[in-house]
Amino acid sequence: MPFQKGNTLGRGRPRREVEEDYRLLFRNAVTKKDYKEIIKRAVVQAKNGNATARAWISNYLIGTPTNDRQDEVMEAFAGILWDRNDEESLPSR
């Protein structure tokens, strides 16, 4: 394992301070307005069939599907797609 204690083959995981430095660089370089524009662009791309944009948005809205949470995630996704107040029934799986 690369991050095992005693592994001398690599430098190992970066220190938390290094990660924090990089996070702050990003945070200072990207404004809320910038990020909002990025999100809007991703929404347009997702609507036009871009699977990567759709996955990125879905991961933020409902989380990444895992085997133990798949039903929960699909239920959340269905709630986003169909207004629960509608008379339409959800499609069966």
Image (tube, rainbow, N blue to C red):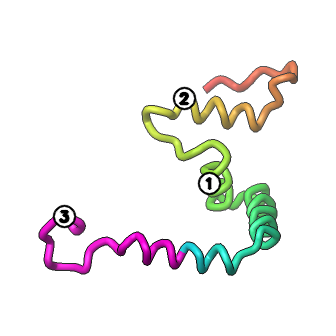
Describe residue 5's horizontal placement relative to residue 25 as left or right: left
Mark identifier at residue 71? 2
**Looking at the figure, which quarter contains the N terminus?**
bottom left
- Which of the pair 87/8 is nearer the observer? 8
Residue at image x 49%, y 33%? 69
Residue 86's place in the image compared with 5, above or below, is above
Q: Earlier in the sequence, mark 1 or mark 2?
A: 1
Q: Quadrant of residue 53?
A: bottom right
Q: Earlier in the sequence, mark 1 or mark 3?
A: 3
Amino acid type at circle 1 is Ala
Describe residue 28's horizontal placement relative to residue 17 as left or right: right
Q: Is residue 9 magenta?
A: yes
Q: Secondary structure at mark 1?
A: helix
- Which of the pair 7/62 is nearer the observer? 7
Q: Position of residue 42 (x, y in %)?
A: 74, 63
Circle 3 crowding by C-alpha within 10 Å: few under 14, some 14–19, many from 20: few
Provide the residue designation for mark 3. 4
Q: For the residues carrying marks 1 and 3, which lies nearer the camera in this image? A: 3
Q: For the residues carrying marks 3 and 2, which lies nearer the camera in this image? A: 3
What is the distance, in whole Å, between disc 1 and disc 3 at their CAs?
Answer: 32 Å
Provide the residue designation for mark 1. 55
Q: Secondary structure at mark 3?
A: loop
Number of numbered callouts drawn:
3
**Looking at the figure, which quarter contains the C terminus?**
top right
